[in-house]
Image (cartoon, grey):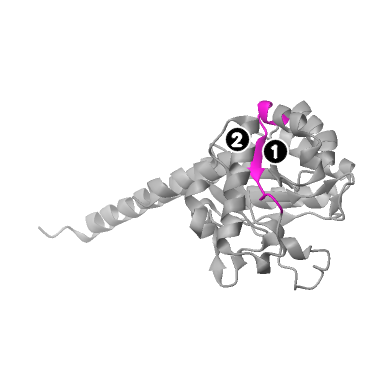
């Protein structure tokens, strides 16, 4: 049967409109709800088990009902001298995460003169590194009783020689956080090296600009803090940090703020469903 020209045009137009509406619905749903019903996700991560995290960060997060991720190294004084306080942070819902026992970094790079020869990653075997990662998981389990864990690469160094050491223990972790400043959409995320923005001296307004960009692009944003109000050469003023977290708390309807492990688990499940 050959349709008259006007009917053919009508059916073609109707089909085009329906397809456009379906596409628009998909785009709007993605923009408004892909991140656990929110426009974007934000993880607040803090490295090196610094006492200022317990003194300055945990109290303000608790006051706002927000949860952070704290990457601990077992030998750092901020860990050794505050074990009970770290346990209390875990009991309050914060994530205790793996930053290795001795925080080894490659020492023969510019600006790495501070690296101790005994913890120079370039002198490690892969087995030594992965053993220390596994032992740190055991150490953290004694504090929070959990087996699921995330990892953060010390100094962002991902390889020993030409070996990506995380791959040998990936089954022991949900995900690994790297140090590349990037924010990606949910299907673009590589859970073996999730990018993060290292913060050093930025204003609260600059930090909030990053969040707004994540909102606009429906992306994951991971903050990487060291010192907060002191405690490290890489530092953000406490007042500026607090501007950020207050903004986050005020916009929780649009922003999913959660421990890194919760977001990574969600990404893993979402990606799995999409690729079936």
- Residue 257 visible in the current orientation: no
**Residue at numbered disc 1:** 68
Residue closest to the eye, 237 or 103: 103
Is 231 on the left or on the right of 257, as rendered?
right
**Picture residue at 68% right of the left edge, 49% below the top:** 101
Q: Which of labels 2 and 1 is toward the front?
A: 2
Say what secondary structure mark 1 lies in.
loop
The verdict on residue 91 being magenta is yes
| Residue at image point 66% right, 63% down | 157
Q: Where residue 23 sits: x, y (%)?
A: 42, 51
Q: Observer-nearest residue: 180 or 121?
A: 121
Residue 51 location, quadrant: top right
Circle 2 is placed at which residue position? Answer: 141
Comparing 241 with 49, the one in front is 49
Question: Residue 121 vs residue 12: left or right?
Answer: right
189 in relation to 231, above or below: below
Q: Residue at x 70, y 32 (%)?
A: 66
């Amino acid at each position: 049967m050959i349709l008259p020209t006007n009917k053919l045009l009508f059916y073609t137009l109707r089909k085009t409109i329906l397809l456009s509406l379906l596409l628009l619905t998909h785009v709007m749903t993605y923009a408004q709800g892909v991140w656990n019903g929110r426009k974007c996700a934000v993880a607040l991560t803090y490295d090196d088990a610094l006492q200022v995290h317990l003194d300055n960060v945990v109290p303000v997060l608790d006051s706002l009902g927000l949860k952070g991720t704290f990457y601990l190294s077992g030998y750092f004084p901020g860990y050794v001298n505050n074990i009970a306080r770290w346990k209390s942070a875990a009991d309050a819902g914060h994530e205790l995460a793996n930053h290795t026992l001795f925080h080894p970094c490659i020492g023969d790079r510019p600006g790495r003169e501070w690296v101790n020869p005994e913890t120079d990653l370039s002198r490690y075997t892969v087995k030594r590194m992965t053993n220390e990662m596994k032992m740190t998981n055991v150490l953290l389990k004694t504090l929070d009783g959990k087996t699921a864990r995330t990892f953060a690469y010390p100094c962002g160094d991902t390889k020993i020689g030409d070996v990506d050491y995380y791959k040998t223990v990936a089954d022991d972790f949900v995900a690994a956080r790297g140090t590349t400043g990037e924010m990606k959409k949910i299907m673009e995320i590589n859970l073996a090296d999730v990018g993060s923005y290292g913060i050093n001296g930025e204003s609260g307004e600059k930090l909030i600009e990053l969040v707004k960009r994540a909102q606009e692009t429906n992306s994951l944003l991971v903050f990487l803090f060291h010192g907060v109000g002191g405690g490290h050469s890489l530092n953000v003023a406490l007042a500026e940090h607090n501007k950020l977290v207050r903004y986050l708390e005020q916009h929780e309807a649009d922003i999913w703020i959660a421990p890194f492990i919760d977001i990574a688990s969600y990404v893993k499940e979402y990606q799995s469903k999409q690729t079936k």
